[in-house]
Amino acid sequence: MIKASDVKELREKTGAGMLDCKKALEATSGDMEKAIDWLREKGISKAAKKESRIAAEGLCQIKYEGNKAVIVEVNSETDFVAKNEEFTTFVDYLTDIILNNDLKTNEDVLNFEDGGEKISDKVIALTSKIGEKISFRRFAVVEKNDGEVFGSYKHMGGKIGALVVVNGTSEEVAKDVAMHVAAMNPTALNRNEVPAEDVERESHVIKEQVMAEGKPAEIAEKMVVGRLNKFYKEICLEEQAFIKDDKKTVADYVKDNGGSIVSMTRFAVGEGIEKKEEDFASEVMSQIQNS
């Protein structure tokens, strides 16, 4: 009988999934070294070596059903793999899993079992099969009321994904708003959502700029208010000039169509991940010299 402690040890040594480790130990009568070789022969343990690599490419996917929607980001190392059918199929599959189950955190998703195998193990298996690191990065679940509608938009085949909820208007209007969110990258829905520390920092910077221009402190204080309004217009969705008609704000566009904006969510693949600068020519030469 294979002990759980042995399965755990093999997993730690190879990075392979629990199910694969159990199979390897069963196939080798519990011999740890032979089990490692078994996994290597199957190409499964290769996934562990890729864990330190940077995966900053990939796809966003958005799906909704009824009053529930999800937006998901899954990363790969290269844009080439992000277009791979096996990768895109997995992203679709993962999005469906989240949409159809009550999962709150990344840990919930990775520990979820489907067909007797955890999602985390499926990620490792796909990493091994495709040949580069695959990483489930993040997701958001968005819910709406019956009188509200979802709007979504994916740019560049899923490099940027935007999901919005609007009230009292059409899906077409909601999609227009989502398209705007994808293009203009607002960081807040309205002024109330802008963190106080961001406002304080911006106010300080503006005041220092104005005083550096030679304005006295009391004048600088008044000018801060005006320039803060410009700051809000740049980052708040409701106050941004609408991309399809810059003579009106996004809030005005929605209002003119009988509605209001409830929420927005925007993912851009790889944002915040420090990408490794690759010298392709040097990498190829290195491989030739080492072959």
Image (spheres, rainbow, N blue to C red):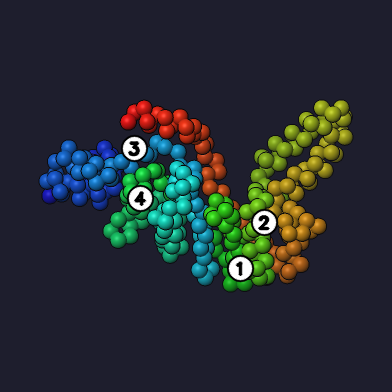
Q: Is residue 61 above or below residue 148?
A: above
How far across and how far down the image is residue 139, in percent?
A: 49, 53
Lower position in the chain sequence, tag 4 or tag 1: 4
> Is disc 3 placed on a helix, strand or loop?
helix
Distance between the alpha carbons at the discs numbered 4 and 1: 35 Å
How far across and how far down the image is residue 220, in percent?
A: 84, 34
* Quadrant housing residue 199: top right
Q: Residue at coordinates 72% horizontally, 56% vertically from top-left?
A: 243
| The disc label shown at residue 149, or none | 1
Distance between the alpha carbons at the discs numbered 1 and 2: 16 Å
**Which residue in the structure is indicated by mark 2?**
180
**Which residue in the structure is indicated by mark 4?**
126
> Is disc 1 placed on a helix, strand or loop?
strand
Callout 3 amino acid: Lys
Lower position in the chain sequence, tag 3 or tag 2: 3
Question: Do the residues bearing badges 3 and 1 touch, measured as CB atoms within 8 Å?
Answer: no
**Which residue in the structure is indicated by mark 3?**
49
* Quadrant housing residue 197: top right
- Position of 144 with respect to 134 (left or right) is right
> Is disc 2 placed on a helix, strand or loop?
helix
Question: Do the residues bearing badges 4 and 3 touch, measured as CB atoms within 8 Å?
Answer: no
Callout 1 amino acid: Val
Give the mark toward the camera: 3 or 1.
3
* Quadrant housing residue 214: top right
Distance between the alpha carbons at the discs numbered 4 and 3: 14 Å
Distance between the alpha carbons at the discs numbered 3 and 1: 44 Å
Q: Residue at coordinates 24% horizontally, 41% vertically from top-left?
A: 40
How far across and how far down the image is residue 241, in percent?
A: 75, 54
| Of the pair 234 and 40, the residue shown nearer to us | 40
